[in-house]
Image (cartoon, grey):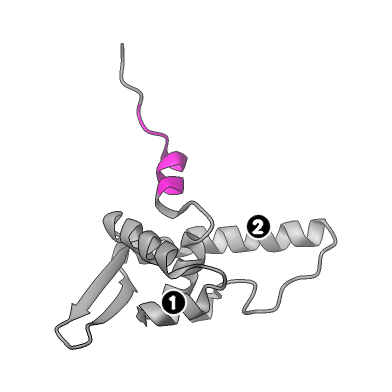
Amino acid sequence: MAEEKPCAVDVTLRVIGGRWKVLILQDLFTGTRRFSEIHRAVHGITQKMLAQQLREMERHGIVNRLVYAEVPPKVEYSLTPLGKSLWPVLMAMHKWGLEQLAATGNPAPSPRESGPQAADLPGH
């Protein structure tokens, strides 16, 4: 029996799917963050869930975790080049969401609620 090739959409969903990963990415697109900064920015996520999501994203190679040899330990999270390559994917999701809101007669969210803007990404 021939082995099935993985579906590219399935691969993408395994890396960024779920309730929290896109929101974490949205925050990290604005720059390097400490755990507590991400926790404050992603409303409703528990510390345990944030730690789990960051570990998964690190395993997938889209988030970098840098630990400083200090007491107490300082840990910073940033996007890897692979993580930064997700920008067009998030922007496409953002655009589709705005179009869906307009099509259903819902008001557009405020700029902070509506997600990342092109100007938020370093180098844009």
Specify the farthest residue to the top: 1
Q: Main secondary structure of the magenta part?
A: helix
Please give the label number shown on residue 96.
2
Does residue 16 appear left or right of residue 77 in this picture?
right
| Quadrant the N terminus occupies | top left
- Find disc 1 in the rendering and name its residue: 38
Residue 81, given in percent of the width and then of the height, sits at 30, 66
Residue 35, given in percent of the width and then of the height, sits at 37, 77
Question: Viewer-proximal residue, 111 or 68?
Answer: 68
Q: What secondary structure is found at the residue carrying circle 1?
A: helix
Question: Residue flagged by tag 1: what amino acid is it?
Answer: Ile
Res. 2 image quadrant:
top left
Crowd band around label 1 with a 10 angstrom C-alpha radius: few (<14), some (14–19), many (20+): many
Question: Viewer-proximal residue, 119 or 51?
Answer: 51
Residue shown at 48%/68% (left/top)? 46
Residue shown at 33%/74% (left/top)? 78
Specify the farthest residue to the left: 69
Residue 58, given in percent of the width and then of the height, sits at 29, 61
- Of badges 1 and 2, the one in the foreground is 1
Magenta residues? Answer: 5-14
Q: Is residue 118 above or below residue 21?
A: below
Q: What secondary structure is found at the residue carrying circle 2?
A: helix
The answer, for residue 121, to whether it is visible in the render is: no
Question: Residue flagged by tag 2: what amino acid is it?
Answer: Trp
Q: Is residue 57 above or below residue 68?
A: above
Q: Earlier in the sequence, mark 1 or mark 2?
A: 1
Q: Is residue 14 above or below residue 54?
A: above
